[in-house]
Image (cartoon, rainbow, N blue to C red):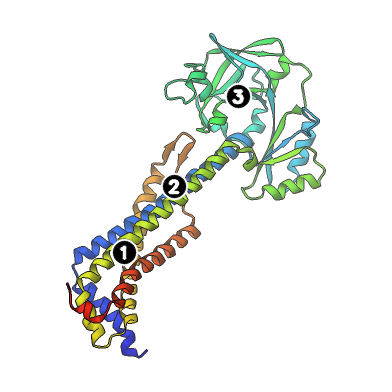
């Protein structure tokens, strides 16, 4: 290919863009920008929801790792020594025991067996952030023996998802009766928390001191121990270290503890794939229609160019360059609008969802992949009409019917 021939596609595109209708060009670029924003917005939203869900499990429910007793045991014994051994492991920040109280709560004429946990408030603060989500009242103190804090799903009220099974209108200062092993104890609701994670918000917490008052001698035991690490991603490595040091019990990661939320995450990823396909299809159809109309309008001109010796691949190359210009310009405009307006807005005003407030989180590998995919899809969509017109006989192209 000579240098003159190499310049022909670029000359063609330059002429098209300079002499074409500027408003039409802006509209095409804007449509491509909207298509690209749609692609990265949905992906970033789902990334934000998934990340928020994962953080909710870790921060309010289970920590990064949870140790359960061996299958032939009901409790973990010698908890204090075990926690001291756990803290010696690198990357472990804190650990807290939790005791599942097999009792019922009664408020007025409502009685049910919600998940009640006896905790060490100070240790629990280091692993979960329930204390930071108290919406009314206060968190438990170490020596509280007559207090309880309950989640929003138990307290009930307007807008509560499980209000039909709740206390309906319990507030701080109200009294509830805890029934455990045939013993009843009246407790005062000291605080109500709302983490926006329904599994946590369906829990109630009392202190270990309260449990020991009801069941004297129940000390240094736990149903499980939650462990907080320095960051996500080290779970398997730390689990192996715990096993190597001889710490007995069944150790599970937060992913394994997430249960239903893990299924919700998979559902979001499946929906993301569908929206990605639809977004790519919209981008392809947009380019196809634009190039098809342009080629139909210039059919006779293309036929004359072929008649004077312009090779078909040069014409096809010109339209490939044209689609690249449209798609890249649309992607750049879409990126400017997305990062300059949309992301800052939703950072300031997160999506309020039942599972937590979610912002937009950009996966840069995914972003680049979508960037490249839009360009590739656009080239293929633009090539279809270009190949078609260059395969028509020259006389049929020139002689328009």
Eyeballing the image, is 274 above or below 298?
Answer: above
> Which is closer to the viewer, label 2 or label 1?
1
Q: Distance between the residues labelled 3 and 2?
A: 35 Å
Left or right of residue 398: residue 7: right
- Per the image, the residue denoted by label 3 is 140
Please tell me whether mark 3 or mark 1 is closer to you in this view: 1
Labels 2 & 1 near each other (Cβ < 8 A): no
The image shows residue 117 at horizontal and vertical percentages of 65, 25
Horizontal side of residue 1 vs 97, given as left or right = left
Whether residue 26 is visible, yes or no, is: yes
- Say if 357 sits above or below 388 in the image: above
Above or below, comparing residue 369 to residue 176 in the picture: below
Separation of disc 3 and disc 1 at Cα?
Answer: 62 Å
Q: Which residue is drawn at 53% across and 9% down?
A: 108
> Could you tell which of marks 2 and 1 lies nearer the N-terminus?
2
Q: Which residue does the numbered mark 1 point to in the structure image?
A: 287
Disc ID at residue 45: 2
């Amino acid at each position: 290919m000579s240098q003159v021939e190499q310049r022909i596609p670029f000359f063609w595109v330059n002429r098209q863009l300079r002499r074409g209708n500027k408003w039409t060009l802006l509209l095409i670029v804007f449509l491509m920008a909207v298509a690209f924003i749609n692609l990265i917005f949905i992906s970033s939203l789902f990334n934000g929801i998934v990340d928020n869900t994962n953080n909710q499990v870790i921060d309010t429910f289970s920590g990064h790792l949870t140790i359960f007793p061996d299958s032939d045991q009901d409790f973990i014994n010698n908890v204090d020594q075990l926690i001291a051994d756990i803290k010696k492991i690198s990357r472990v920040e804190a650990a807290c025991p939790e005791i599942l109280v097999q009792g019922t709560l009664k408020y007025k004429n409502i009685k049910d067996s919600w998940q009640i946990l006896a905790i060490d408030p100070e240790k629990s603060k280091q692993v979960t952030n329930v204390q930071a989500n108290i919406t009314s009242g206060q968190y438990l103190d170490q020596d509280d023996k007559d207090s309880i804090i309950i989640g929003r799903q138990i307290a009930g009220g307007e807008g509560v998802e499980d209000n039909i099974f709740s206390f309906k209108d319990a507030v701080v200062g109200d009294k509830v009766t805890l029934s455990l092993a045939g013993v009843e104890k009246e407790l005062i609701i000291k605080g109500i928390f709302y983490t926006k994670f329904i599994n946590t918000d369906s829990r109630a917490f009392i202190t270990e001191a309260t449990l020991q008052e009801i069941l004297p001698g129940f000390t240094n035991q736990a149903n499980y121990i939650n462990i907080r690490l320095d960051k996500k991603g080290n779970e398997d490595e730390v689990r192996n270290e715990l096993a190597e040091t001889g710490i007995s019990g069944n150790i599970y990661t937060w992913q394994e503890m997430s249960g239903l939320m893990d299924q919700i995450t998979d559902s979001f990823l499946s929906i993301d794939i569908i929206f990605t396909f639809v977004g790519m299809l919209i981008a392809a159809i947009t380019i196809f229609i634009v190039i098809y109309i342009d080629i139909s309008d210039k059919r006779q001109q293309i036929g004359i160019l072929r008649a004077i010796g312009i090779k078909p691949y040069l014409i096809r190359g010109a339209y490939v360059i044209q689609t690249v210009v449209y798609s890249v310009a649309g992607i750049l405009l879409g990126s400017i609008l997305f990062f300059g307006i949309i992301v800052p807005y939703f950072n300031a005003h997160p999506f309020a969802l039942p599972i937590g407030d979610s912002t937009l989180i950009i996966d840069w590998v995914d972003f680049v992949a979508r960037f490249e995919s839009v360009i590739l899809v656009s080239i293929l969509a633009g090539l279809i009409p270009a190949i078609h017109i260059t395969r028509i006989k020259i006389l049929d192209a020139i002689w328009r019917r």
